[in-house]
Amino acid sequence: IAGITQAPTSQILAAGRRMTLRCTQDMRHNAMYWYRQDLGLGLRLIHYSNTAGTTGKGEVPDGYSVSRANTDDFPLTLASAVPSQTSVYFCASSESGRRNEQFFGPGTRLTVL
Amino acid sequence: GENVEQHPSTLSVQEGDSAVIKCTYSDSASNYFPWYKQELGKRPQLIIDIRSNVGEKKDQRIAVTLNKTAKHFSLHITETQPEDSAVYFCAASSPEYGNKLVFGAGTILRVKS
């Protein structure tokens, strides 16, 4: 693994189904983030984690949950998907402290029908 | 919390001309202002950033200026080329918001050859 990866690349999901988007980084970054990207709305923060074992809510957390069991992995779960969660999801990571540069994964395109 | 507004939403320029994208932010404590470029179907990537202790930063054909008093910052691209065509996002980060990035809605830049 080099950098930050996401899986799956894309997914079509029936409403009401449970779905977990995976994110893994090998840069030993402490902080990780999940964003959704919708046309005209930019990147909106869903959840974040400043370090393993801690998580926090972003701007649009409803309907999503995260966990951070270790430094490398930061999965995002949709417990019961709804059509409004159709979006492109990006995971990102950064070093903690003053260095704020975030490195993004390739994204997951999710369609909820 | 922080709010970032970005203008224009779309910008078309002739190859060789300059392009300017402007952002305003609301939190006077914000101290880090990155710009990301996102090509079609790709992930956002950092192209330049500036911290609040400087007023201008330049990297080859791109530059960023910051006016802390007015709470706005701008991206300047000179001698535009077709490969500059992309979506550009500004962002702001404040220690009062846990150093998380708040993004603008994005600007679609088209460079016509």
Image (tube, coloured by chain):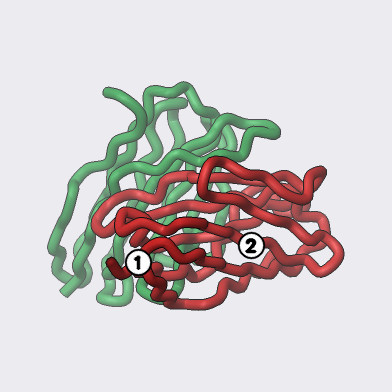
Chain colours: A green, B red
Judging depth in this view, the residue of A73 and B99 nearest the camera is B99
Up/down of B64 relative to B110, above or below = above
Q: Position of residue A91 (x, y in %)?
A: 39, 46
Which element is circle 2 on?
strand
Q: Which residue in the structure is indicated by mark 1?
A: B111
Q: Are marks 1 and 2 on the same chain?
A: yes
What residue is at 61 percent from the left and 39 percent from the top? A100
Ranked by sequence position, the earlier of labels 1 and 2 is: 2
Mark 2 surroundings within 10 Å by alpha-carbon count, few (fewer than 14), some (14 through 19), many (20 or more): many
Please name which of the two marks, 1 or 2, marks the residue nearer to the observer: 1
Numbered badge on residue B74: 2
From this viewpoint, which residue is outermost toward the front?
B16
Write down the quadrant of residue B113 in the picture.
Answer: bottom left
What chain is tagged by disc 1? B
Q: Position of residue B81 (x, y in %)?
A: 36, 56
Q: Callout 2, which amino acid?
A: Ser
Judging depth in this view, the residue of A70 and B69 nearest the camera is B69
Residue B94 appears left or right of A94: right
Whether residue B1 appears in this view of the structure is no
What residue is at 56 percent from the left and 39 percent from the top? A101
Q: Callout 1, which amino acid?
A: Val
